Each structure stands twice: as structure tokens, then as C-alpha cells.
Image: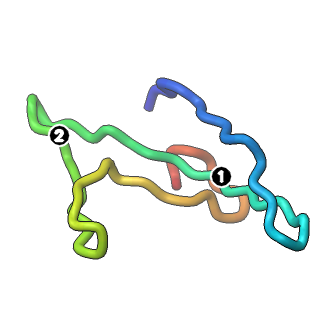
């Protein structure tokens, strides 16, 4: 696995002045020249596989 980029969004606050943070990872999975994309029926679109980090997971496990 190779980290391509890291994105940090400005902190978003709720009306109660609480800050939300989410650590997640996205992957580009290739087999030869084919790229894996996941279809999301809810949004009717395709995206790269992704996952949130749970507990002591690292980026590749997520």
C-alpha cells in the first residue's frame, strides 16, 4: 500500500459547538488494467472502496 495523499477538512462544528472527526481510508484496487469501483444504490454513483478506522486499525486495515 502506498499513501498518495492525506486530506484534512476544516473542523466542522455542530450547533452545540461540538467538533466531528472521522478517520477513514480509500483505496485504488487494481487487477491488471481493471480498477475496482463500488456502486452505491442510495446515491446512484460509483466510488473507490473505503472504510473508517476502528480502534487500533491502521489505514490498510480500514
Q: Position of residue 52 (x, y in %)?
A: 57, 59
The mark found on residue 8 in the picture is none
Residue 29, compared with residue 45, is above or below; it is above
> Is 59 or 39 nearer to us in this picture?
39
Q: Position of residue 40 (x, y in %)?
A: 26, 67
Residue ID at (27%, 41%): 29
Q: Which residue is mark 1?
A: 23
> Is 28 or 20 nearer to us in this picture?
20
The mark found on residue 35 in the picture is 2
Q: Position of residue 57 (x, y in %)?
A: 64, 55
Which is nearer the N-term, disc 1 or disc 2?
A: 1
Residue ID at (29%, 51%): 47
Extreme-left residue of the structure: 33
Say left or right for 33 vs 27.
left
Quarter of the image for residue 46 reads bottom left
Residue ID at (21%, 66%): 44
Residue 8, compared with residue 26, is above or below; it is above
Say left or right for 17 vs 29.
right
Say left or right for 31 vs 2.
left
Residue 42, compared with residue 23, is above or below; it is below
Amino acid at each position: 500500500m502506498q499513501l498518495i495523499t492525506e486530506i484534512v477538512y476544516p473542523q466542522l462544528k455542530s450547533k452545540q459547538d461540538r467538533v466531528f472527526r472521522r478517520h477513514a481510508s480509500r483505496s485504488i484496487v487494481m487487477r491488471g488494467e481493471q480498477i475496482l469501483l463500488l456502486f452505491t444504490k442510495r446515491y446512484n454513483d460509483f466510488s473507490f472502496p473505503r472504510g473508517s478506522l476502528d480502534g487500533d486499525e491502521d489505514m490498510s486495515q480500514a
